[in-house]
Image (tube, helix red, strand yellow):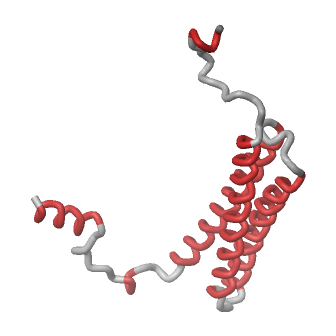
């Protein structure tokens, strides 16, 4: 049994696959980097939309500081779009862009993480200090009706 699980583990991590990075097309890393910027921008805008929705409902009475999360999400989206634009410009000019792209990605991820943290803490605190009873799935028990 132990041998079976070991074999399955090695298969799942592709331990027996011979990688040949020299066969990877030269432009593939740039295409993947561009896709990453697209995804970061999408996640950022989705996070901003979610935050605004929560501010309009669950976080209605939360302090104004929760809007910082919206600003961070929007700024992250702008940095991601800027990073993608600079990536394309650098490729057209045949200039090195790896370091600048990594900085853009790191800044985006840091802002998204900070925004998620602020939003999560706001939801937690709003729920913790809320006087309203928890809403059940629409069905009330016999004890709740009395």
Q: Quadrant of the N terminus?
A: bottom left
State the residue lying farthest toward the right: 64
Tally the numbered discs.
Answer: 0
Q: Measuring 66% from the left and 63% from the top, which residue is drawn there?
A: 40
Hey, which quadrant is residue 136 in on the image? top right
Q: Is residue 123 left or right of residue 1?
A: right
Viewer-side residue, 51 vs 63: 63
Viewer-side residue, 54 vs 65: 65
Q: Position of residue 55 (x, y in %)?
A: 82, 43
Q: Measuring 74% from the left and 79% from the top, which residue is drawn there?
A: 86
Is 95 rendered above or below residue 132? below
Q: Is residue 136 left or right of residue 21?
A: right
Hey, which quadrant is residue 128 in on the image? top right
Is 18 rendered above or below residue 53? below
Q: Measuring 79% from the left and 57% from the top, which residue is drawn there?
A: 69
- Confirm whether residue 6 shows in the render: yes
Q: Position of residue 137 (x, y in %)?
A: 59, 22
Is 32 rendered above or below residue 43? below
Q: Is residue 84 left or right of residue 72?
A: left
Q: Quadrant of the C terminus?
A: top right
- Confirm whether residue 53 shows in the render: no
Is 13 rendered above or below residue 51? below
Hey, which quadrant is residue 42 in on the image? bottom right
Q: Position of residue 3 (x, y in %)?
A: 11, 65
Q: Measuring 17% from the left and 61% from the top, which residue is drawn there?
A: 5
Q: Position of residue 98 (x, y in %)?
A: 62, 86
């Amino acid at each position: 049994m132990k041998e079976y699980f070991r074999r399955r583990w090695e298969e799942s991590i592709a331990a027996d696959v011979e990688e040949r990075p020299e066969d990877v097309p030269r432009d593939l890393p740039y295409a993947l980097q561009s896709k990453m910027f697209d995804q970061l921008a999408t996640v950022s805008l989705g996070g901003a939309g979610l935050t605004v929705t929560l501010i309009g409902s669950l976080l209605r009475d939360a302090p104004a500081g929760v809007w910082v999360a919206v600003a961070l999400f929007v700024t992250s989206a702008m940095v991601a779009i800027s990073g993608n634009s600079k990536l394309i410009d650098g490729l057209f000019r045949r200039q090195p862009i790896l370091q600048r792209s990594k900085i853009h990605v790191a800044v985006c991820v840091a802002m998204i993480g900070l925004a998620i943290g602020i939003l999560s803490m706001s939801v937690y605190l709003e729920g913790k200090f809320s006087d309203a009873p928890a809403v059940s799935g629409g069905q009330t028990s016999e004890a709740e009706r009395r």
